[in-house]
Amino acid sequence: MGTYVPNTKKEQQEMLKEIGVSDLRELFRAIPEEVFLERPLNIPAGLPEMAVQQKMSGIAGKNKVFHSIFRGAGAYRHYIPSIVKQITSKEEFVTAYTPYQAEISQGILQSIFEYQTMICELTGLDVSNASVYDGASAAAEAVIMCKERKRTKALVAESVHPETLETIQTYCSGTDIEVVLVPAKEGRTDIDELRRMIDNETACVLLQQPNYYGILEDASLIGDIVHEKDAKFILSCNPISLGVLKTPAEYGADIAVGEGQPFGIPLSFGGPYLGFMAATEKLMRRLPGRIVGETKDSRGERAFVLTLQAREQHIRREKASSNICSNQALCAMTAAVYLDAMGAKGLRQAAESSMSKAHYLAEKLTKLKGFHLVYSGEFFHEFVTTCNGNVDNVLAALEKRGILGGYPLSGKDEGHLLWCVTEMNTKEEMDTLVGILEEVTKA
Amino acid sequence: MKLIFEKSNAGRGCELLPECDVPVTSVDDKFRRNKELHLPEVSETELSRHYTELMKRTFGVNDGFYPLGSCTMKYNPKVNDDIAKLSGFAEIHPLQPVGSAQGCLEVMKLAEEYLSEVTGMDAMDFQPAAGAHGEFTGLKLIAAYHKERKDTKRTKIIVPDSAHGTNPASAAMAGFSVINVASTKEGYVDPEELKKVVGDDTAGFMLTNPNTVGMFDENILEITKIIHDAGGLNYYDGANLNAIMGLVRPGDMGFDVVHLNLHKTFSTPHGGGGPGSGPVGCKELLIKYLPSSRIILKDGKYEYAEKSPESIGRVKAFYGNFLIVVRALTYILTLGGEGLKNASENAVLNANYMMSKLQESFEIPFSGHCMHEFVISLEQLKQEKGVSALDFAKTLLDYGMHPPTMYFPLIVHEALMVEPTETETKENLELAIEVYKKVLEQAKSDPELLHQSPVKTVIGRPDEVMAARNPILRYQFNVNGE
């Protein structure tokens, strides 16, 4: 079996002698006899490293790696620069704990400070935290942040990602926050309904931009409606899109959240990802999680520390703004290195290419019989179409050719496909996709 | 050192993406970003060197002894990271058809089986992303259980005053009110005190055992029974599981729900503060409330069972921090059942060895054998010489060691909590013992020296008060964006 325990039998004996006991069992005397586990754990015997490699590679081999992916719906395949992977594999960054000891953690602290700066730049807001678990939990934390004594209603657009909505509902159930859905009409938030529903008890309105269907919402107008009632406006946004699309601040958002995975993090079967969160200065002390600040050290030099800790669980216990302790620090660093490497120009290019290619595919697809856009209006890099014929059969035919097709929607969108295109999809790939679809759906 | 923004120079950058090979779609003015975007403009060389500089200003487990109590900073095996980087795991879309993600489901099913065995639970859910997230999830299960039984007056969670701060914070977040119960002076739960606070409003009780002073609570069966008799459920905080794998199981001690920290006990790295993974395990009676759909094996294929209508709902998108679960499974396969037990035994052996060697010089407020960690109190030193736990910890930095956890648990004054872990050699422990004693001598002979420390680190002590009073939380670009 493999082991990482260096103590030899002889050393163990020496140590036991020093402690003053005769065997290891004696150290566990406090465990009541009736529950002491006398049998071995029913887990297979350990294996040497090579055998483990082979076993785990075998399991990985049972997954299918698609080389052509036209599916997003919350997880996006973008180009990951080589330097991102190299830097974030450095052992110091990988193995360090939360930077409690600032003097020997300046590297991690500074990288988080740089990350916070870039999240502020992207969103146009004043303050960013050091990250939370993912986009969905960031949205839920944002809703909780907005609760006030007399404002306990959270309006959430029906057009947000369904898993974001479900996470918000779980976080709010059992608290005095009431989550109410603002219905969508033709793939977009129904503005009239919103006007009707919002009132003086509304703490916040949460909107996703672009929304789950890829459509760009009229976020400026919605922001105005929210602020007329003095409620908070939370915008959940796709971070790549911020290279070309309006910032949450330009729409008047008080809080911006989102899934940071597109910034250099592989698909990873859904995690670990990165929840980013930024807010106006006014809301700074309500933000959950770690925040890094700049200060001076005893020598008068610039230094970075974890700060505003009076919000946090280890100080405030049951009165903390959130229970979050571990976050996604290494993923935040991944995003920071990605943005460093891409720069504003590269990010704009990724965003423009994704958007342009999505429009190219949409145009080609909708020329096919039985495929048309379900929702009209501006979209970014995702769009919904009908499907000519049985969705499962069509997707299975694509899968046979190594293509992961659009995501089959459910509920009232049953039978529709949510397509996603990024800079990774070439024109040739898209033409092949359309060719196969034409062939498959003709029969 | 400079920030990356201060190394930026307009016009520099990396050429990473090809030209767009389709006609460019322009964004409608209504949606176009007007605000200028300042991101660094640096060459790849500069970027690489910037992070090498940051790396040198970071202390990882690979740099030296890291006995941060309660955090289990054991060695992070490199094979785990290699496996997590396989394209067969890293490049799998979470919404791929189940038939094309059989390997991912197998990973979660195997990890569930093994971790359930270690903890004595009947199921394990990997959706929670970290320990505190697991606590929140586990407490929601308890809430759902009482709610379904229409036992709605159970609104209180009992937490010992020695508990991790996340316990009461999670309970509050899950909608409970928190009852703090005083520990005995030995750091144990006082069954008599517990009896006074339980009642028909008790929803549950949260405990870590070994407790936060590193001692195994031998009254554990009585404690969990008091809660069960009152109609509450027992929650096990898995932060300290590294002491008991293969020796005793939370499920056998009377716990109904647990969370684990895969980034502590199961050797996955901490990443400077995350990502971790905080799976929740539970007994049969709570399975139907779990956030994720159960994975089942049907005709030789893995699939998701239909989601239970009683589920508390998801706590995060998709299936949790999957690649962390991959690493933990790799670790379990490497060690096997016997190896896990061996790890725990040696974690406890190392801690006792250090404690026993330090006992003559330091005040260790609890008697008996410790488990995987122990607590030193510097209260006397503080009173006599004005040297605090903070001063002591900062001095250790100059010896190239990560200090123990400071000022926790709250029930011990001037606490230093030492958790050496099983992956340290006897020589490393002896070196640390020698250094601790030497620093203690210094503290007695020249306390001022400790107030001034550290002197060998890249920065001196930072002014935390200034950071909080005048928060500077981002770099400000000047008008030109330079």
Image: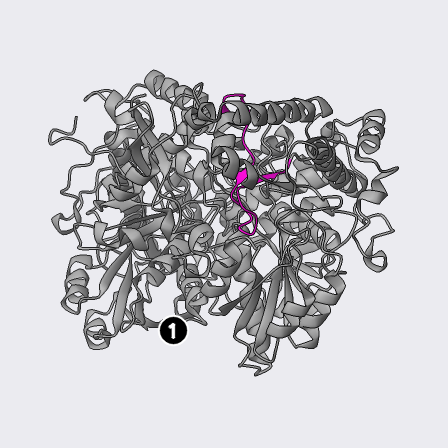
Which residue sits furthest bottom? B150
Residue B226 lies in the magenta stretch: no
Residue A280 appearing in the image: yes
Residue at image coords 17%, 43%: B26
* Whole-percent x, y for residue B374 in the image: 65, 41
Residue B310 appearing in the image: no
* Whole-percent x, y for residue A8 in the image: 81, 26
Left/right placement of residue B263 relative to residue A441 reads right
Q: How many marks?
A: 1
Residue at image coords 83%, 39%: A24
* Whole-percent x, y for residue B367 in the image: 72, 46
Reading the image, the residue beneath label 1 is: A176
* Whole-percent x, y for residue B204 in the image: 60, 69
SS assignment for the magenta stretch, majority: loop
The N terminus of chain A lies in quadrant: top right
| Image vertical order of residue A301 relative to residue B315, above or below | above
Residue stretch in magenta: B396-419
Name the kind of residue labelled 1 in the image: Asp
| Image vertical order of residue A208 relative to residue B35, above or below | below
**What's the chain of the residue with tag 1?**
A
Residue B403 lies in the magenta stretch: yes
Graded by Cα atoms within 10 Å as few (under 14), some (14 to 19) or many (20 or more), the crowding at tag 1 reads few
Which residue sits furthest front? B384
Residue at image coords 31%, 38%: A293
The way the protein has been coloured in the rendering is one colour
Left/right placement of residue B146 relative to residue A208 reads right
| Front position in the image: B437 or B347 | B437
Q: Quadrant of residue B444?
A: top right
Q: Quadrant of residue B327?
A: top right
- Tag 1's secondary structure? loop
Q: Quadrant of residue B71?
A: top right
